[in-house]
């Protein structure tokens, strides 16, 4: 749908409900795209972060190199990284997901490492004494105890991704960021307001959902808290 013409300055309030009603399909599509790209980016980041953290946990001497590399990725300017990938992958989702997933790595790798290293040695020794295989020990003993830290990392990575994704509007993949960019270009405040408010609400909703799921998955941690 073609966006409506920007109103004159004296008829340009922060929010026009007629715009929200007329553009509801476009707003919903932008919200769903924002949600989809956020979930994909965090999932890809987690899929990459898990083996990196496993290497760091298995070979402690690699920890500095792995965290240093992920920290380097985190410091790269998002706009520049999006622009550099466009010649390679075009104005596609891949050009969006790669940077966003890269920005989650430092948070996720660090929290996974901290979570597993916070498991008491006595617990690991007890699991070994019971004859558990390394895989069963990790999945059945260490992972559950590390989950609170891992879930915290996922929450931070998800909220950060929701915010960073708005910048991807410069390559046409920004979800709600497209509304913000459209409003900025035309000095039309309503799309900016809608995009910004929905981005905030989406971040809060995802954070609350992950928190709820995390607490449901770790009832022992909830009972142990004061």
Image: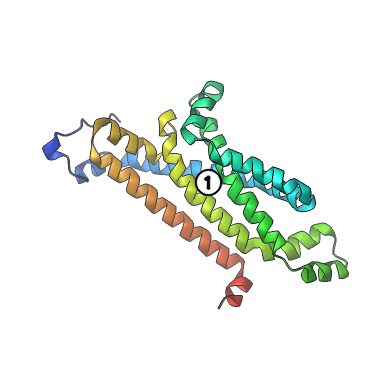
Front-lying residue, 68 or 208: 68
**Farthest-out residue, top:** 87
Residue 65 appears left or right of 33: right
Q: Quadrant of residue 7?
A: top left
Q: Quadrant of the C terminus?
A: bottom right
Q: Is residue 185 visible?
A: yes
Q: Quadrant of the N terminus?
A: top left
> Horizontal and vertical percent for residue 141?
75, 65
**Measured along the vertical axis of the image, is residue 19 above or below residue 143?**
above
Label 1: few (<14), some or many (≥20) within 10 Å?
some
Please tell me how many numbered marks the rendered image carries.
Answer: 1
The image position of residue 201, as x and y in percent, is 38, 53
Q: Nearer the viewer, residue 168 or 209?
A: 168
Residue 120 at x, y = what percent? 74, 68
Q: From this viewpoint, which residue is outermost toward the left?
A: 10
Q: Residue at x 50, y 41 (%)?
A: 37
Give SS at disc 1.
helix
Q: Residue at (61%, 68%) from the top-left corner?
A: 218
Who's the residue at 79% across and 49% down the image?
59
Residue 214 at what x, y percent from top left? Answer: 57, 63
Here the colouring is rainbow
Q: Label 1 belongs to which residue?
A: 39
Above or below, 186 against 132 in this view is above
Left or right of 119 on screen, residue 6: left
Residue that lies at the very extreme toward the bottom in this rendered image: 226
- The answer to whether residue 33 of the structure is visible from this angle is no
Q: Nearer the viewer, residue 78 or 186?
A: 78
Would you say 185 lies left or right of 80 here?
A: left
């Amino acid at each position: 749908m073609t966006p409506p013409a920007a109103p004159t300055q004296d008829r340009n309030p922060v929010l026009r409900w007629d715009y929200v009603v007329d553009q509801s399909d476009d707003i919903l599509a932008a919200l769903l795209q924002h949600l989809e790209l956020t979930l994909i980016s965090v999932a890809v980041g987690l899929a990459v972060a898990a083996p990196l953290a496993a290497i760091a946990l298995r070979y402690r001497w690699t920890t500095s190199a792995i965290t240093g590399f992920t920290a380097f990725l985190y410091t790269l300017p998002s706009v520049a990284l999006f622009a550099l990938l466009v010649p390679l992958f075009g104005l596609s989702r891949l050009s969006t997901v790669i940077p966003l997933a890269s920005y989650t790595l430092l948070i996720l790798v660090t929290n996974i490492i901290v979570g597993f290293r916070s498991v008491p040695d006595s617990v690991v020794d007890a699991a070994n004494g019971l004859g558990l295989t390394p895989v069963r020990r990790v999945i059945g003993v260490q992972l559950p105890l590390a989950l609170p830290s891992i879930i915290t990392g996922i929450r931070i990575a998800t909220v950060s991704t929701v915010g960073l994704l708005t910048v991807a509007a410069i390559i046409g993949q920004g979800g709600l960021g497209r509304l913000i960019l459209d409003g900025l270009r035309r000095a039309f405040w309503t799309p900016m307001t809608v995009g910004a408010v929905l981005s905030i609400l989406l971040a809060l909703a995802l954070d609350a959902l992950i928190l709820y799921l995390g607490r449901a998955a770790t009832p022992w941690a909830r009972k142990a808290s004061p």
